[in-house]
Image (cartoon, rainbow, N blue to C red):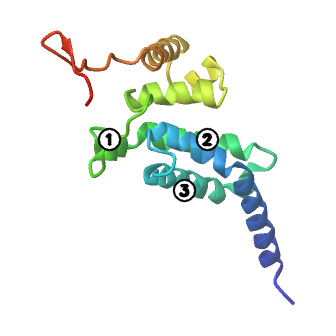
Amino acid sequence: MRPRHTSQDDLRARAFEAYVAGAGARLLHTATLLTAEAPDDNPHARRLLTLALAHTYAGWDRLRGGDPYAHTRQCLVTRFASGSWHRRGGLLRSRARPAGPLARLSPQERLVLVLRLREGIAEEQTAALLGLSAERVRTVFHRAMAAVLRPPPRPSSAVGGVEAVPS
C-alpha cells in the first residue's frame, strides 16, 4: 500500500503540470517580451520563467483557490524588475543585442508596456504591482508607446546629397 502523501504529491504534480501545459506558452511569451529576446532564441526568458514557475510550484498548496497565473506572473515581474541580470547590459553581454521595437525600451518601459498591453492589467494594478504611483506608470507607458510607435529614423543611405542606388 502506498503512503497517502505520495498520492497527494502525485495529484499536486499533475495539477501543476496541467497548469503549466495551459499557461506556459503565454507566460513564456510574456517573459520573452520582457527580455526583448527573439521568440526562437530566448534563453534568458526561459530561465526567468523557470524560476517563476519553481516559486509557484513551491507555494502551490498555499494558493488554495487563488489564481496560479497571477501568482506566476507576479513572480516573473518581480524577478525581472529586481534582477541585476538585465541591468548594465548583463543580459546581453555574450550575445548580439536583439533588434525589434521592444529592445530599444528600458527594462521599466518594457515591463509597464507588457503588463498594460499584453497582460491587460489596469494602470492602478500595475502601479501597485511595481510599487510606483499611477501617474508614474502612466508617464512610463506613454513614453514607451511613443518610442514603439515612432521608431528613430533610419540612417540615410545618401552620400553627398545623392542617394545610393543598389547595383
Query: Height in image: 167 above or below 71?
Result: above
Residue 68: mark: none
Comparing 15 with 101, the one in front is: 101
Mark identifier at residue 73: 2
Report the residue marked by disc 3: 50
Q: Residues within 10 Å of mark 3 (few under 14, many from 20)?
A: some
Q: Mark 3 touching mark 2, by CB under 8 A?
A: no
Say whether residue 32 is left or right of residue 53: left
Quick one: label 3 or label 2, which is nearer the N terminus? 3
Residue 49 left/right relative to 121: left
* Quadrant in which residue 69 is drawn: top right
Which quarter of the rendered picture does the N terminus lie within?
bottom right
Residue 16 located left or right of residue 32 = right
- Residue 62 image position (x, y, % from top left): 72, 53
Tag 2: amino acid: Arg
What kind of element bears circle 3?
A: helix
Percent across and percent down for residue 58 are 63, 59
N-terminal of the pair, mark 1 or mark 2, is 2
Is the C terminus in the top left, top right, bottom left or bottom right quadrant?
A: top left
Marks 3 and 2 sit apart, C-alpha to C-alpha, by: 12 Å
What type is the residue that disc 3 sits on?
A: Thr
> What mark, if any, has residue 97 been given in the picture?
1
Amino acid type at circle 1 is Arg
